[in-house]
Amino acid sequence: MAINKKDGMNYAPKGSANKVVDPGEFKVGVGALDHGHIYGMCNGLKEAGAEIVYVYDKDPKKIEEFQEKFPEAKAVNSVDEILNDPEIKMLAAAAIPNLRSALGNKAMKAGKDYFTDKTGFTSLDQLEETKKVVEETGRRYFVYFSERLHVEGAIFAGKLIEEGRIGRVIQVTGFGPHSLNKESRPDWFFKKDQYGGILTDIGSHQIEQFLYYTGNKDAKVLHSKVANYDNPDTPELEDYGDATLVGENGATFFYKVHWFSPKGLSTWGDGRTFITGTKGSIEVRKYTNVATNATGDHVFLVDENGEEHFEVNGKVGFPFFGEMILDCINGTENAMTQEHIFKAQELCLKCQEEAIVID
């Protein structure tokens, strides 16, 4: 179901088509191709029935590569050409992280909803400005938290929690290791003012999951730290980070993210989530089952009735994309509320801002 198993930057899951709109009803323009996650974002949109109409990037080679996957997308000379088309409902983009919020503000002021790769922000000031734009325009700002939204095992874990299989969730632990693939990374990846820091960037996935699985609308950062352990030639790169939080309902959270996936691993990262409830526990092995099965989406449940192993790859789907499209059309918030998105982003920014730097 997934491609690019060894390359996290270009990991773009594919699912089955589950169209929620008629052809031409929801037209999308793509406005920046700086990160490969744009392919996963567009796969999800297209499978839900969206039409990818335009593509723009300052690099013609990136446009050419994008059109190989989405030949229906017409290349244009600027983002303004996309935003000036009244038929376009959404701008999807994976710009350099520190430019994502400004692009989104521009899109929303032009009357479009916006779908950005994570992280959507690299500073709290950016977050506050975008909140104002959302309120003023009535448009929507969506963030691609792919480690839950585009992982069937993570979606299935949420359903088990909703069913009450493990009782009240009291603790979540998240592991988000990634492959560095240093030679293939763009320059901005190593500049902290551009990528925002490791807890802002890949840490944003983790906090979103914590809030979702525990049902929290707010949380407090207790402790966070970052380090550059093994990349002295790129001193602004943080190759390790972790943090501890507690939610307003008392549930706690620890997560760690880093760029040290071993080269012998079958995929780009052995991402896992451990969820402890009052009546049971869940483990999600997202991308591989180490030394056992190279497929992802393994979910392990232990409760009062025993132990279960669910292999859900290809069985759950990715409902977020269709729900997002319908939210844009109907003014609802079924996919993900703005409050949830902004709180997840606020907390990852605070983790970064308050982090102890390990020398």
Image (cartoon, rainbow, N blue to C red):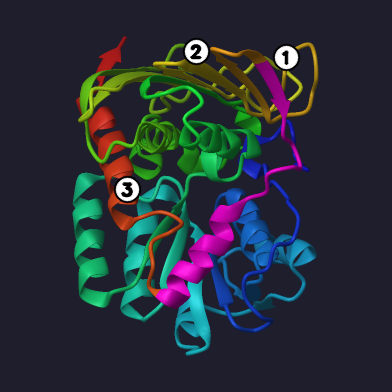
Within the magenta stretch, is there residue 258? no
Residue 315 within the segment the image draws in magenta: yes
Say the numbered circle drawn on residue 290.
Answer: 1
| Neighbours of disc 1 within 10 Å: few (<14), some (14-19), many (20+) | some
Q: Quadrant of residue 65?
A: bottom right
Label for residue 340?
3
| Contact check, label 2 and label 1, Cβ < 8 Å | no
Identify which residue, 152 or 352, lies in the foreground: 152
Nearer the viewer's eye, disc 3 or disc 1? 3
C-alpha distance separating marks 2 and 1: 24 Å
Where's residue 198, x and y in %? 40, 30
For disc 2, the neighbor class at 10 Å (few under 14, some 14 to 19, many from 20) is some
Lower sequence index among marks 2 and 3: 2
Q: Amino acid at mark 2?
A: Asp
Q: Amino acid at mark 1?
A: Val
Pointer 3 local density, CA inside 10 Å: few below 14, some 14–19, many at least 20 = some
Q: Quadrant of residue 307?
A: top right
Q: Secondary structure at mark 2?
A: loop
Q: Mark 2 = which residue?
A: 230
**Cα distance between the residues tagged 3 and 1:** 32 Å
Where residue 202 appears, x then y in whole percent? 46, 34
- How many numbered marks appear? 3
The image position of residue 14, as x and y in percent, is: 73, 50
Residue at 51% of width from left, 41% of height from top? 187
Give the magenta part as a residue range. 308-330
Q: Nearer the viewer, residue 190 or 242?
A: 242
Look at 20% across and 74% down and name the residue there: 136
Residue type marked 3 = His
In this picture, residue 242 sits left or right of residue 175: left
| Residue under the image location 64 percent in, 57 percent down | 44
Instruction: Judge left or right: residue 224 versus residue 65.
Output: left
